[in-house]
Amino acid sequence: MVRRVVFAFAIALLALTSFAQSAKPSLTLDEFKQKLQSAKDPQILDVRSPEEFAENHLKGAVNFYVPDDESLAQSIGNISTDKPVFLYSINNGRSTTVSAKLLAAGFKEVYALPGGLAHWIGNGNPIETKAGSGLTVAEFEKLIPSQEVVLVEVGSKHCGGCKKLAPVVEAISHEQGVKVINIELYDNRQLAKELNIESVPTLILYKGKNAVWRKSGAMTKNEIVDALDNSL
């Protein structure tokens, strides 16, 4: 009987997901913060893995790791449908998916953090963490030689897109002889703010200490090589 209920719940969520995604307009980061600050008894759900949650999270958040519909069906009773729900993941992938499913399941107010935790950190907002603030801007600038082209890769070991991009960047580094600086987002929050990071992965190409090219998200090897060629 339990399996039948879970299966029926999952089917209902899948059927209503597309409707739910269009039913709620996306918020800006400032609008999300205002709603969170003004909400009475907000439910803040971190939909990342327990490992990620243990490393850092928003103040007042609880871990709500639901990688599939069955785990969501088993956990959904722990949150109230009558109180606002605020969700986040590292970018927007997981949080947007869970947000749509909660709306489809009857929750009245569900808001996904726009840009995810990467955008939150990149705008200088606080998180609870045991890690230090990381590199200062002065320390970062010392890593970039004034007469060389340098590729800065801002990402996270927990980011799927970052894992896909890493071997591409490594290959380009060997083939082109370009210096690559890897910046872990969660360990360098102050630098992420100064670099205005809104999502990961983000690549920034420097020439003579000046940023001459920048791109976030999915990108091809040819795009990166073209940017390098144009800078030389």
Image (cartoon, rainbow, N blue to C red):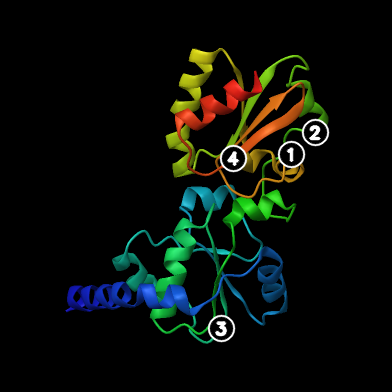
Question: Would you place residue 69 above or below residue 9 in this image?
Answer: above
Q: Which mark is residue 215?
A: 4
Q: Tag 4: Cα neighbours inside 10 Å, few (<14), some, or many (≥20)? A: some
**Foreground label between 4 and 3:** 4
Residues tagged 1 and 3 counted as in contact (Cβ below 8 A):
no
The residue carrying mark 3 is 83
Q: Are marks 2 and 1 in contact (CB under 8 Å)?
A: yes
Alpha-carbon neighbours of circle 2 within 10 Å: few (<14), some, or many (≥20)?
few
Q: Helix, strand or loop at disc 2? A: helix
**In the displayed structure image, the side of residue 81 where residue 3 appears, left or right:** left
Q: Which residue is mark 1?
A: 191
Pick whichever of labels 1 and 3 is earlier in the sequence: 3
Q: Around disc 3, counting alpha carbons within 10 Å, would you say few (fewer than 14), some (14 to 19), or many (20 or more)?
A: some
Viewer-side residue, 194 vs 151: 151
Camera-near label (1 vs 3) is 1
Could you give the CA–CA distance between mark 1 and mark 3, rounded to whole angstroms?
35 Å
Residue plotted at (61% across, 24% down)? 230
**Circle 1 residues within 10 Å: few <14, some 14–19, many ≥20:** many
* Kind of element beneath mark 1: helix
Q: Nearer the viewer, mark 3 or mark 2?
A: 2
- Of callouts 4 and 3, the N-terminal one: 3
- The residue that disc 2 covers is 137
Q: x and y percent of residue 161 in the render?
A: 46, 42
Q: CA distance from mark 3 to mark 2?
A: 41 Å
Left or right placement of residue 66 versus residue 142 in this view: left
Q: Specify the amino acid type for callout 2.
A: Val
Q: CA distance from mark 4 to mark 3?
A: 37 Å
Residue 172 lies, with reference to residue 138, above or below; the image says above
The structure residue drawn at horizontal position 76% and vertical position 21%, both measured from the top left corner, is 208
Please name the amino acid that badge 3 sits on: Lys
Classify mark 4: helix, strand or loop: strand
**Nearest to N terminus: mark 2 or mark 4:** 2
